[in-house]
Structures are given as structure tokens and as C-alpha cells.
Amino acid sequence: MPELPEVETTRAGIAPHVCDQIVRTVIVRQPQLRWPVSAELAEALPGQRFRAVHRRAKYLLFEADTGHVCLHLGMSGRLRLVAADTPLATHDHVDIVLENDTAIRFNDARRFGSLFWLTGNPYAFSLLAHLGPEPLSEAFDGDGLHARSRGRTASVKTFIMDSATVVGVGNIYACEALHAARIHPRRPAGRIGRARYRTLAGAIKKVLADAILAGGTTLRDYIGVDGDTGYFQLDLAAYGRANQPCPRGCGPIRREVLGQRSTFFCPVCQR
């Protein structure tokens, strides 16, 4: 599933090509995604100019003259910039065709993605309104994590993957950040001190920033907007490395299932 670095890589890759471009038409071939594609999209968007492309958590917001296209890639969705007459591939569900004969093409094999047309404040939309802070913003820090964790008995991994705590920390990057901070993923969130949460917040920021610089992590379905793949998987210290040596040289990485997710950690240096 594309996580925050993959979505941010998509945003950064597509924005220079669509900003200041006028939409000619919208072609919806498959309206039944995770939620039905907004019927207003094909009616309201043509003739409008894209002003910017923003990201909130794992959602992309294409800012137009009178509203926003809110897009979520879901489990397997991806965007490509193609010539408008490019032959269709399987699962090419939506084209937003620009006046320069380029199409923003949305492909989603599993159909867990979504496209909405929003007017008014997009951040008040029901799927965005209750999200936690962005992990790379100044609003996110260890003191805030510590405050929100008091009284919480859930595991720290479950806690940091909760989008009400902080957005965009998916399974891969939660494993990596906890390994970097030397915190065991099963430790109860409420039993971690302020100093360790400051270390963890710094680790989350660094892991995500490094992944964005590397273009994301290539696992299963993720492919960038330019058709290339990310390279952060070459730097993974814990995720997917079961029975391989911990990079710190203290023992093999262990895999366990936590919250129905594969969890990778070092039982020696993570406490």
C-alpha cells in the first residue's frame, strides 16, 4: 500500500506538470471504487485551472478554481501522466484530460482508491477533519506524542499508526522508526517516557524524510508517477528482514504479527 513517502513522491512528481493547466474533460470508466467517484467531478472540473497540488496524510488535493479533487491511492492505486491518446491498460479507471493533451490517469487494480470533488474548505471534509498532525511539520514532536499516550494501554506501534495520533506512519515506517529509536513495538504506549518519545518523534521524521528522498519504498504494487520505483527498500533496517542480522550486530531480526500486521524488530536492542 502506498504510504506517506510514496504519496508525497507522487505529489512532487505530478505537480509541476499539472499546475496552471486547464482541464478539458474528465473520463470516468469505473465509478465504483472504495466509494463511488463523485458524479460532480466530470460536471464541475472541465474548464477549471489547477492551481496547486497539496497532500494531507495519504490524500492528494488538486486545487482548482472552485474546489478540490481529493484522491486517495488506496491499496494499489497509482497516477501516471500520459498522452491523452495512450492506449488503455487494465484497471485504468479515470482520466483527467488537460488542454495540453496530457492525461492524469488513475489506475487501481483493487479499487480501494477514491476520488471526490470537494467545494469549500477541503480540510473540513469528513475523511480529513479528524486527522492528527503531519509528521514532518512543527506540530508533531515527542512532547505531543508523550501527552497523547498517557493512559494508553495499546502497543506503541499501534499508537503511532493511528492517524488520530499522527498521519502517514504506516506499517513499514513504524517498524523502521521503532528500530531506529530502539523501542520494542509491543511496549504499551502509556509506559514510555517523554525522552524516549522525543527520540521516537525524531526517528519518525528522519525515516520518512529519507524515504521521500529515495522516492519511496517498492513493495508489491507501488510505482512512481514517472513509472520508476522507489529505492528506500535498499536501506530498510528491520522491515522484511526476518532472520537476518540486525544492522547493529546484536542478533537476528524477528517477525511477529501485531494488530494483524507483520512486525519486524530486534529483540535484543529494542526494549
Image (cartoon, grey):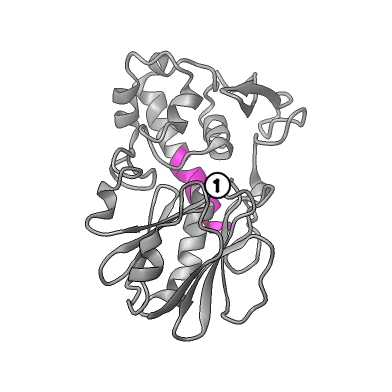
Query: What segment carries the magenta color?
Result: 204-214
Quadrant of the image for the N terminus?
A: top right
Residue at image mark 1? 112
Q: Residue at x 47, y 23 (%)?
A: 156
Q: Is residue 245 above or below residue 126?
A: above
Residue 255 is situated, as x and y percent measured from the top left of the image, at: 69, 25
Q: Is residue 33 above or below residue 202?
A: below
Find the residue positioned furthest to the left: 120
Residue 211 among magenta residues = yes
Residue 93 appears in the rendering: yes
Q: Residue at x 27, y 72 (%)?
A: 65
Q: Nearer the viewer, residue 88 or 192?
A: 88
Residue 118 among magenta residues = no
Q: Is residue 72 above or below residue 271?
A: below
Label 1 crowd bin: few (<14), some (14–19), many (20+), radius 10 Å: some
Residue 118 is situated, as x and y percent measured from the top left of the image, at: 31, 58
Residue 94 is situated, as x and y percent measured from the top left of the image, at: 53, 65
Q: Residue at x 36, y 70 (%)?
A: 43
User: Magenta: predominant secondary structure element?
Assistant: helix
Left or right, 235 with reference to 63: right
Residue 61 appears in the rendering: no
| Amino acid of disc 1 | Phe
Left or right, 78 with reference to 40: right
Q: Is residue 129 above or below residue 39?
A: above
Element at label 1: loop
Q: Residue at x 40, y 40 (%)?
A: 167
